[in-house]
Image: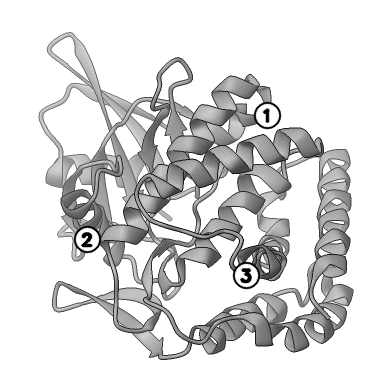
Amino acid sequence: MSTPEADIAAVLRESGPDHDGFTFETPGGGHQSDVYIVTMAHGGEEYEVVVKFKPEGNVPFEVEPRLHEYVADRTDIPVPRILVFKQEPTVDVPPYFVTERVHGHNLATEFGQLTQDERQRVMAQAGRVLGDMHSEIGFEAFGRLDLHNDRIIVRDWMGSWRDYFEQLTRAHLTRLDGTPFEELATRARDRIEPALDIVPEDGVPRLVHDDFRPANLLFERDTEQPITAVLDWQDVLAALPEYNLAQTEFLFIDSSFDDPQIKETLRQRFHTGYREFRPMDFADGYEERRPLYQLSTLLWRMAGFEAVFADESGLATARAEAKYREQFERLIDTLPT
């Protein structure tokens, strides 16, 4: 059985620059175990790259490095530059790509400790990032993005946003089986199904980073534009922008803070940043649909709960489970009836 060290050494032999040795570590903040920060030594100096291997399972791995280039060419969103991509390596390792190492701290590990001014700057830039993404890149149908003949395509596409959102949410519900939240699935389904009527069917499908959360952002706290990189472009959709906006409000604001004034201030900074790039009337039905989109996002988090908290203490896991259940009750109670 191969080890990360052996696999990284093979990658560096195949694709790496000259080096006298290397060390590696996994990034914090919830990244997958198949991502490594590699520090190489050569000529008395050190330099870093990031190596990501294809995870096990049937995942469209090749679309991620292509999306890095696609987004960088069309927007000002900070994405790491792809240095190497090997779909069929000549060495005995899974497919992989290598990116530049963008410096910054993982936002997930520090977001709660930032000052309110620092959080406001992060949320304003998060809004600008999504506004830039949604204003510049559109598609002809809703669905998950994939690569075909080196072209980004919409896989298993659907013409109705309502139908596609229902499909996404049903998949999250199915994955609750065997989790600590299994008994909530029926209740969630019974409340979600009648509320789907408020979800639009039509709209222009836009590029949506379906894992846009603090763990996938690098930042430097003492700058006006603190976000230095948006990472993990593996889960990307063609979807309605409002879905991405509601997700972001949940993952950055509503699941992180209890104080209504703090939440409202951060929300307004996020909205203002977004409107710098793309017009959006947040009062035109969005607030009514937001709890439904956020509940779908919470179900996705619940489905992955055990994997995320596998290495945490029993107390930390119990606290997180209680928090998820509290969020579930709040969102269920705010769904339209």
Q: Residue at x 59, y 58 (%)?
A: 247
Nearest to the eye among marks 3 and 2: give it. Answer: 3
Please rate how many residues cluster around mark 3, counting C-alpha atoms within 10 Å: few if below 14, some from 14 to 19, many from 20: few
The answer to whether residue 3 shows anywhere in this view is no
Q: Residue at x 70, y 68 (%)?
A: 288
- 333 w.r.t. 130: above or below: below
The colouring scheme, among rainbow, by chain, secondary structure or one colour, is one colour
The location of residue 234, given as percent across then percent down, is 39, 61
The location of residue 292, given as percent across then percent down, is 70, 71
The location of residue 211, given as percent across then percent down, is 50, 56
> Real-space Cα distance between discs 3 and 2?
35 Å
Res 80 quadrant in image:
top left
**Residue ID for mark 1:** 112
Q: Residue at x 77, y 77 (%)?
A: 177
- At label 2, the amino acid type is Arg
**Residue ID for mark 3:** 285
- At label 1, the amino acid type is Gly
Provide the secondary structure element on which disc 1 rests.
helix
The residue nearer to you, when weighing 237 against 10, is 237
Nearest to the eye among marks 3 and 1: give it. Answer: 3
Q: Quadrant of the N terminus?
A: bottom left
